[in-house]
Amino acid sequence: MIKLHEVHKIYTQGKTGFHALKDVTLYFERNETVVVYGKSGCGKTTLLNLIAGLDKPSSGEMAINGKMTSQFKESEWDYFRNHNIGFIFQQFNLIEHLPVLENVAINAKISGNNHAKSKKMALDMLKKVGLEKHAHKTPGELSGGERQRVGIARALINDPDIILADEPPGALDKKTGREIMDLIKSVAKDKLLIVVTHDLAMAEEYATRMINLRDGRVVSDSAPKDQKVKLTFKKEKHRKSLSFKEGIRLAYFNMKARAWRSTLVAMGLALGIIGLILINSLFTTVRSSINEQGEILRDNPELTLRYPYDGEADPQEYTELLRTHYPYFSDISYRPSHSLSIVKNETTENPLINPLRIDRYTAVPESARIRALYDDFIEDGRFPENENEFALTLSQAQNLFSPDARLTKGEIWERVEGNDYQIGTRFHYIVEEEGLLEEEGCQYVEHWNGSEDDLPEEFFDGFSSSDSLSTHLDTLSDYRPSPIEFGNRTYFCDDYTAIPWVLDHDTPKSYQTLTLVGIIDESLFGNAVFHTDFLKSVGTQPLALYEDGSRHNHIQAVGYLDSEHIEQKASIIRTMEDDGFSIRENTQSQFNLLTGLSMLFTYIVQFLFSAIVGIAVITAGLMLLMILYISIIERTREIGLIRSLGGTRKDVRNIFVGETTMIGLFAGLISVVVSMVIILFSNIIFSEQLHNFLSQYYANLPEGPLFTVNVRLMVYAILGSVAIAIISGLIPSVLAGRKQPIEALRND
Amino acid sequence: MLKMQNVYKTYKNGDEFLHALHDVSLEFQPGDFAFLLGESGSGKSTLLNVLSGLDVPSKGSVLIEGKDTDSFSKKDFATFRNNHVGFVFQEYNLIEHLSVMDNVMLPLLFQGVDKKEAQKRATTELDKIGLKKHIAKKPMQLSGGQQQRVAIARALVTNPKIILADEPTGSLDEKMGEKTLAYLKEHAQDKIVIVVTHNEELADKFANRTIHIQDGKILNDTNQRESKPEKQKSLDLKSPKVPLGMLFKFAKNNVFSRIFRSLFTSAIVAIGFVAILLLTFIIMGIRGSLSDAIGSLIPPDEYLLHPIEDTYIDNDTFERVKDNDSVEALRYNIHMRIDTRYRSLEENTYDLNYLALPYDAFAFERDGTLHGRLPENDDEVVISLRTALTLRGMQMVDEESYEYIFNLVDGYTLNADYLDSEFDESKTFTIVGMSEERQQRNVYLTYDALLNIAEERLGNEEFRTSAVAYLTTGDDGEIDSLTRQLRDEEGLVLRNVFGEITAQIDDIMFTALQWFVGIALISLAVAGILIGLVIYTSVLERVREIGILTALGARASNIRGIFLIESGISGLLSGVFASVAAVFIALGLNRLFNNFIETPLNLLLGGELNITLLSPSIAPLAIVLVAGVLYAMLSGWIPSRHATKLNAVSALRKE
């Protein structure tokens, strides 16, 4: 059955060699119980290792069942060991973190049986050795004798032809040792049993054939046998390797045994991934808010609507009318059609550099969506809450001061906060230049004495025929000075309607005093904000020259298209123009650039943050590599055992890949759970603080939760961490597979 | 002397209880050479453990010199072992990385014996056993018998009262075993020697007393002596003090025996530090480069004075501010563009539009070197290179000719007629210097001359919109109060443009640094876990060594110290790695930036950019080094504590 022919084994250690086996020629047959005895160091264990293929002879030939083992490939040895040999060790070599049942079943699994079948086989074996009650304990909970029984069950589960036992009672007391030997002898019936021992008494008791080894030589053989062996070169077939599922399963037990370490490693990996998840979900919110803002601005919902109107229209009625007739607007509010102007600072009595004309203004938007676009006040500024308050944009407020002073935002706000300003609401009409009057054929009198006699000639004639001078002057409304004066000249015209009248914003006809309650830092629409009641009270200044309104007057409103109708802006404008409106769009164009820039900035910041967190992920990957490498050194024995049971390199590799997969999965789950918890907590508890903090950098953040939970992101996180773990574990796993079984077992 | 009274010891194994010692009463006197015989599992080892305090009895008491050890703390036992107990093991249990000499010295050093004295005593002891020649060797270089003799020397060197020998001959051949025992017997006559063995032959040969033990019970005891009641003596328990150097030696060995692992671990930890360092360097570099760039455009000590709500600073206000103690110099900020006609040089006439500026050293520094000298009176001027070229009707020249150009205009006079006003007076200036400004047609006059022209030509208000001030003080508090005073009393804003801009830059940079470093700390957290795990592994691998140290009387704090030092070394290594790597990467990146971005940019734009992208400095490196060590020690704290809780002595016995 087994034939050794002139086998030598030499170990080299540095420069010196050790001749462990010298010229050994032996033949073993089935049904023998061979006891090889000799002192320690005589070569017995080496002989056993050679037979098991755990070590290779330095010279000489070996044949097993007629097959030359020198022709064996490693995979063939694996197959052979697994199917034909049962190995019983002095130190039991059980895998400490696996339950007894798994320790036995693993041998069946390595030979390709599925989990259920292996389990059943293992239970049967355990019954045979009388340990079925202890199947679910770990080896640590068993006594030495019981452990050796488990070892025997494991060795016999694949029903091998050959049983090799290396000092099986060596670590046991006498009585137990005897029991174990009896058990081995009884289960090894019909098999070739080779026992190695230094105990001569035991050898004599059990052996059918005794071989004495001394200094590597066979010195006696009680029943020498020999046979010519017919050699064949048939290849052993390959078997299925340990399934990946089984790898995961074994990894599970290992992780359970080293729960702390596995948890810590997984946590390390999770830390970086949590960071990535949080950064991504925060920036998703920020970006979507910029995007939303950008869309609103790009689509430019602000429209100024003017409608011809006679006399002083009721603003309330007008806006209601617009609202009901044109339901396209999320927000629509009345505004006077003329500019307002700040003429005096009543609080400090400081002179204004110039009266500040406010061309662009609107009522406080009613819709939250639009209001959010305005809501970027410097420090504690706010929207006007009643008709006596107003807010300016930063650029408007800057005009209250010398541009050279280059005050900061804060300084400006400090100077204007709560100030009362006189705001001109209605203005006199004037003619800007003398020349314009002359073009219209008006005549002047220098130093007019106020009497009809002192009029220019034509007018004297005209007036005399129709109206008196007083009637003539009365035709001018109370918004105009009449007669028109430039220096010491007084002008009289034929047709006052033809004159290009303009409002004189420096000298209001009437004004109101309002308190400044806010400065809008980044007013995207460039509008000052007044309370709607104030604007209604200002009303529309008649643009007509005459009281009867014979010249066009109109009423004005500012509307913001809602998101549903923004697409149809062009057609809405057309419809309304057909209805007689004149429509003006807000043409501020730097919005797109602004949005684009903050988008770019956000991407850069997100990239930087993610890259830095990425360093943590890389660190964690390297850590995993390191820890797995250490774990391989620690588990050398286990690896050796699996190889000696006939497990292939691939089996060993699969076990470690299974372990990294588990750690990656664990890390992914931890990171998903922890980041969800952080997200929930910060959305509930720190939401406001975080909001305040972020709005230093991003205006117009949306109200509500700042972290967006994205299911796809979570799935990616788990997949990613598994991938990172597997990649990191690749090198150590391959190294583990390369461990030579003999080295692995020798290490104790 | 050493007495056990009704001692029980029970272990729990799974669900079963194992009685390792069952009602054991024994008494030992000096001179006893007692053999404890029994099969494996009979309780021999447990008995030794209980006697030496490595294990505590479940019931009953152990008396040493009549003193009940019930009250002993772990530390007391450690001291007791160190002072009074010598151990000899089957596997010798020498510390492999220490020389024979160091091994024998170790228990003495633990006692706090001075190194020289310890050396002397160890040499004597080694001489006695005939190993004086081998003192410098490592244990591995000796034979088994020699190693066991070293172990005996180590046990005897402190002159203990008790020697506990656990299968001392188990790994030796018969002859050597007997020789060893004979030696032990000879040198320990006045001591209690307890030898645990299963070899009856040896007992017959050497023992003056044999004790058989089975299943935790004493079967028989050949003790002939009477038990005599003993007075309680005070035990001499000198508290051992382990020298730090010794702990360091152990830690160093831990690191170097697994050098690949140690280096790799430190390298991984270093990654986070490198990131932090590079981020700090780049932010400091950018900040420095920006400050330099701004500093070359805006004088750092120049303050600007603007009216807040008025349009100009009137003369009275100006004079009041000028008289302020904190103000060193004050002048209106006059930059006039004046159209003039110069009759220059050879009576050629040019229409010139020039920027008249008050001269100052800073302006010349910014505009390039000054050729000639500064004007000394109101009739002298410095002109820019561009002005000189215009006067000479020349095009741009290269740098070597600047001096030549200056010589062409040096000492000539400029006659200026103003074209744009009714002011018809012609002024004559002498050119005394030239700046290297190539783009602008500048004429630099003295401030007084400029002020005269400005007052005459611009009317009273136009040039008074702002003023430049230089202060007598650099103190922030004083400047603050001056700023407040000027604002409240004069309605003026005092600004240091340079300071404002750099403060803004600093603010941004500091925020960025905080965020970046904060996020980079995540990788350090990961690295901390790694250090913890590696130290933990190191602890598990060195159970045997910990066991030896415990048996020799090292205290928990000593063992913890070894692993803390080990983590500290890892931290230091990673700090050093990180510093070196960061500096190299920084220099490399700077080179790349300078070669591939800055130089082409300068060529392209004709600029003189001089940017240091990353600026390595000592402070962050030092912080990283110190923080590295401290952080590593913090990470190693838990595993180090774990090391002291292991039942390490059990690892010394052969499985």
Image: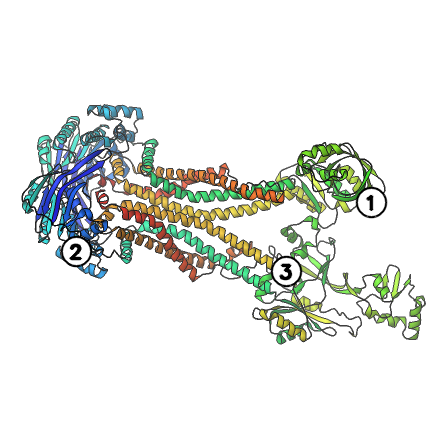
Q: Horizontally, is A450 left or right of A736 in the view?
A: right
Task: Check disc 1 and report its element: helix, strand or loop.
Answer: loop
Which chain does the residue under circle 1 lie in? B
Task: Check disc 2 and report its element: helix, strand or loop.
Answer: loop
What residue is pinned by disc 1?
Answer: B419
Tell me which amino acid carries mark 3: Ser
Tell me which amino acid carries mark 1: Leu
Between the residue at mark 3 and the residue at mark 1, the CA separation in whole angstroms equals 43 Å
Q: Quadrant of residue B569?
A: top left
Disc nearest the viewer among 3 and 2: 2
User: Which quadrant holds the C terminus of chain B?
Assistant: top left
Q: Looking at the picture, how far across and down is residue A433, in whole percent?
A: 82, 61
Mark 1 crowd level (few <14, some 14–19, many ≥20, 10 Å Cα): some
What residue is pinned by disc 2?
Answer: A158
Mark 3 crowd level (few <14, some 14–19, many ≥20, 10 Å Cα): few
Between the residue at mark 1 and the residue at mark 2, the CA separation in whole angstroms equals 115 Å
Q: Looking at the picture, how far across and down is residue B612, in whole percent?
A: 55, 40
Between the residue at mark 3 and the residue at mark 2, the CA separation in whole angstroms equals 82 Å
Q: Are discs 3 and 2 both within one chain?
A: yes
Residue B210's disc number: none
Nearest the eye: B116 or B445: B445
